[in-house]
Image (cartoon, grey):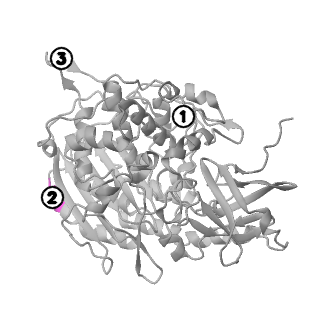
């Protein structure tokens, strides 16, 4: 991690903030030294009344977080007991308030990647412990080629496979996708495999590109596109007809949850992105699938149903890999119309290999990241893991935030229960998906924007507290207010850092020195003269709709950045969370031979070679 004081965080630097060096604990699941969960049923007293009273508080949450709307749903004992779309007062209206609205899942898409791979494992096409190179010989990371024959699917899916996380070089401003699928193997093979001289293999680094890599293996083994496989083998059998994996599905629906950003004058700007496209499997698998609350409640029910031990035709119990000690009912009313459950190998996904995620709350229950899901034993501060809330879970690095966090842990006096959690964060919105296999429960919240904190995860926390009638009662709105207060000046902090490090005292060099094409990470950065003669501009991969003006930052350094908080929000610049992210540093050997780019806080500068310049000879 950089030594500078962290003043602003978004979802990519948030991912790097999760990086920690630690040996993989190869204990089998269920052997934690922490106290084992005791199934605790919620009080029967007025469950529906508790949930029905929540919309006013949910509306307060999204108002405070400056988000236009949220959709929520609750499953309990296999039945849908609560579902609602809620819009902020005086904000954009929901055209069809009772409709199932389709949200971008962002990183929740990864749960479908692990589910798809589980189907292939179950049919004998590969094993979890196979190395990636066994099935994708073209994968040869230049930083450490041995990773191809060392990193297993378990490693990649638990984020310990050795690949860094160059998201900013893939997903550009305005929701544009910088890298086409044809170039993605170049991205994978040039993705850094170490930081500060230390290998990333067998250490935790949240890597989006790792899941993209697995999706490419799914395509190669199945002979279908990732979108076709997910749709045909998971979505259609489960009746998840409102989950989109193709661009056409987005164009054909009138139930899209339009994303918005609230401007400083209170107005709302629509946000768009091109992540949902079957022709770009890596991006689709990482962050691009869209779905509704109801479809994801069905998916969660199917996950829990497949997690429960079954009886074979002779009546013998099938324990599954490292099952929880207690048994579970498979009675899910929400699955009553489903002919069969297509999900396989779920015990291996939820309770097999994992990476322990450290935290310092006073309760000390162990939290573990499995294959696309975080396993938490409540009560724990890690109930909020993976959210975009920087005052909670292991994001809380300041002592005052940790103290407030520890005083706001849900259900301290309500016994232990197991939670599995998946979250998604993007400029277009946030997602919080939570399952409780013991009671066949799920709580889901999707929001259609990000601004001051993670509205979806706060809404999910409120509903979890009401569902299980957790004690003592935690003031969720007070938690929201603390988060909002800590985030109100994010953009100002970035600009302050930028101006502090900017040095324009020296005259600019000859613009022609910098003009040219620079190649790295599967991407071509084109530096060219602006057509109006006003300085230089950057074009990504020759796309005329992805051009950014460059400003002089310092000697041999030019940068691109939003000029105001409104431009930052409506331009989808959530990843521009650190002043160096937009700075290109040109490298000279007499003449300019390349440039370096730092894509997120903590990352080392990556070298892009100037095309047409002879590579230096090795001495």
Q: Is residue 185 left or right of residue 71?
A: right
Residue 76: % across, % down = 19, 48
Instruction: Determine which residue is flagged by label 2.
Output: 48
Query: Is 519 contained in the magenta span?
Result: no
Q: Is residue 580 above or below residue 344?
A: below
- Residue at 22%, 50% (x, y): give it: 241
Alpha carbon separation for disc pair 3 and 1? 37 Å
**Residue identifier under label 3:** 316
Q: Secondary structure at mark 2?
A: helix
For label 1, count other residues whose C-alpha is less than 10 Å away and answer few (under 14), some (14-19) or many (20+): many
* Percent x, y of residue 429: 40, 62
The answer to whether one can see residue 91 in this image is: yes
Q: Which residue is mark 1?
A: 161
What kind of element bears circle 1?
Answer: loop
Question: What number of labels is visible?
Answer: 3
Q: Which of the marked residues, 3 or 1, is nearer the chain's N terminus?
A: 1
Which marked residue is nearer to the observer: mark 3 or mark 1?
Answer: 1
User: Which mark is in front, 3 or 2?
Assistant: 3
How far is the residue under mark 3 from the one under mark 2? 38 Å
Crowding at mark 3 (Cα within 10 Å: few <14, some 14-19, many 20+): few
Label 2, label 1: how far apart the Cα atoms are: 44 Å
Which one is closest to the eye, mark 2 or mark 1?
1
Range covered by the magenta-colored residues: 45-50
Residue under the image location 71 percent in, 74 percent down: 535
Position of residue 166 relative to residue 354, above or below, is below
Of callouts 3 and 2, the N-terminal one? 2
Contact between labelled residues 1 and 2, with CB atoms less than 8 Å apart: no
Q: Is residue 290 left or right of residue 575?
A: left
Secondary structure character of the magenta stretch overall: helix
């Amino acid at each position: 991690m950089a030594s500078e004081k962290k003043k602003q965080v978004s979802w990519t630097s948030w991912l790097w903030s999760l990086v920690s060096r630690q040996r993989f604990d190869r204990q089998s699941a269920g052997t934690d030294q922490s106290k084992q969960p005791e199934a605790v049923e919620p009080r029967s007293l007025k469950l529906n009344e508790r949930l029905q009273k929540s919309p006013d508080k949910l509306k307060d949450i999204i108002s405070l977080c400056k988000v236009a709307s949220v959709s929520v749903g609750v499953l309990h004992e296999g039945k849908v007991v609560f579902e609602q779309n809620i819009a902020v007062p005086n904000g954009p209206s929901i055209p069809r308030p009772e409709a199932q609205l389709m949200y971008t899942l962002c990183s929740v898409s990864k749960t479908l990647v692990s589910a798809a791979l589980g189907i292939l494992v179950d049919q004998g096409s590969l094993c979890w412990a196979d190395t990636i190179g066994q099935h994708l010989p073209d994968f040869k990371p230049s930083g450490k080629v041995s990773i191809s024959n060392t990193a297993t699917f378990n490693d990649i899916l638990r984020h310990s496979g050795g690949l860094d996380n160059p998201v900013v070089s893939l997903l550009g401003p305005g929701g544009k996708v910088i890298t086409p699928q044809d170039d993605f193997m170049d991205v994978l093979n040039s993705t850094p495999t170490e930081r500060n001289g230390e290998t990333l293999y067998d250490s935790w680094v949240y890597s989006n590109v790792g899941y993209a890599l697995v999706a490419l293996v799914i395509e190669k083994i199945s002979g279908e596109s990732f979108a076709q496989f997910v749709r045909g083998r998971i979505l259609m059998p489960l009746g998840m007809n409102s989950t989109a994996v193709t661009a056409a599905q987005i164009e054909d629906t009138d139930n899209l949850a339009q994303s918005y950003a609230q401007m400083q004058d209170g107005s709302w700007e629509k946000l768009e992105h091109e992540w949902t496209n079957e022709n770009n499997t890596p991006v689709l698998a990482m962050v691009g699938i869209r779905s509704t609350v109801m479809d994801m409640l069905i998916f969660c029910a199917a996950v829990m149903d497949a997690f429960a031990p079954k009886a074979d035709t002779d009546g013998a119990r099938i324990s599954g890999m490292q099952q929880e000690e207690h048994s579970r009912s498979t009675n899910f009313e929400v699955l009553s119309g489903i002919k069969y459950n297509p999900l396989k190998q779920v015990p291996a996904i939820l309770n097999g290999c994992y990476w322990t995620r450290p935290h310092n709350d006073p309760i000390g229950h162990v939290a573990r990241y499995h294959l696309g899901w975080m396993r938490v034993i409540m009560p724990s501060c890690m109930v909020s893991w993976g959210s975009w809330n920087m005052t909670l879970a292991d994001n809380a690095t300041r002592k005052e935030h940790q103290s407030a966090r520890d005083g706001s842990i849900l259900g301290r006096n309500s016994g232990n229960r197991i939670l599995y959690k998946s979250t998604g964060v993007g400029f277009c919105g946030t997602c919080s998906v939570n399952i409780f296999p013991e009671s066949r429960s799920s709580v889901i919240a999707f929001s259609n924007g990000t601004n001051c904190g993670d509205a979806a995860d706060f809404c999910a926390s409120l509903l979890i507290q009401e569902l299980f009638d957790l004690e003592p009662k935690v003031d969720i709105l007070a938690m929201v207010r603390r988060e909002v207060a800590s985030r109100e000046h994010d953009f100002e902090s970035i600009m302050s850092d930028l101006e502090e490090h900017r040095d324009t005292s020296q005259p600019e060099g000859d613009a022609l020195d910098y003009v040219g094409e620079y190649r790295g990470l599967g991407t071509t950065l084109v530096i060219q003269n602006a057509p109006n003669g006003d300085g230089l501009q950057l074009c990504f991969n020759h796309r005329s709709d992805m051009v950014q003006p460059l400003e002089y930052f310092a000697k041999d350094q030019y940068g691109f950045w939003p000029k105001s908080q409104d431009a930052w929000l409506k331009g989808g610049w959530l990843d521009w969370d650190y002043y160096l992210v937009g700075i290109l540093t040109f490298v000279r050997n007499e003449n300019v031979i390349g440039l370096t780019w730092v894509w997120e806080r903590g990352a080392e500068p990556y070298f892009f070679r100037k095309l047409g310049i002879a590579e230096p000879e090795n001495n």
